[in-house]
Image (spheres, rainbow, N blue to C red):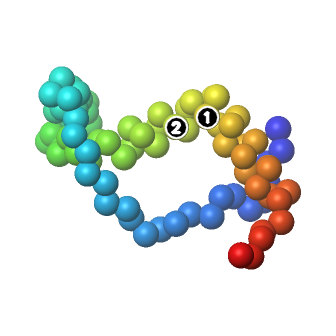
Amino acid sequence: MTKLKLGPLVDDKPVKVTLELPADVHRDLIAYADVLGRASGQKSTDPVRLIVPMLQRFMATDRAFAKAKRSDQAHDAGTPERSG
């Protein structure tokens, strides 16, 4: 596997997203926050704060996504920019 010296450029500007969760997913987020709080010896955190790290973890461990992303980045790196 090729390890590039320059990683992907990060857009540091946060993007606000509004979404509706099914009630059972929300209940599970609350339960997860409670379990995480007990396991870490801290009080339960706001379940909404779990969404970003969960998405990050999910995408970081999805092998098919990683492979597709690498393929797309390699394709983009080999394609000259076009000005319109």
Pick the front one: 13 or 50: 13
Give how far across and how far down residue 19 sits, in percent.
Answer: 26, 45
Of the residues under marks 2 and 1, which one precedes in the sequence?
A: 2
The alpha-carbon separation of the residues under discs 2 and 1 comes to 7 Å
**Tag 2–tag 1 contact (CB < 8 Å):** yes
Residue farthest to the front, as pictured: 84
The residue lying at 31 percent from left, 54 percent from top is 17
The answer to which quarter of the image holds residue 22 is top left
User: For mark 2, what is the residue?
Assistant: 59
In the picture, measured across the screen, residue 54 lies left or right of residue 11, that is left
Residue type at numbered disc 1: Phe
As helix, strand or loop, the secondary structure at mark 2 comes to helix
Quadrant into which the C terminus falls: bottom right
The residue lying at 55 percent from left, 38 percent from top is 60
Residue type at numbered disc 2: Met
Quadrant into which the N terminus falls: top right
Pick the front one: 24 or 76: 76
- Mark 1 surroundings within 10 Å by alpha-carbon count, few (fewer than 14), some (14 through 19), many (20 or more): few
Q: Is residue 10 above or below residue 31?
A: below
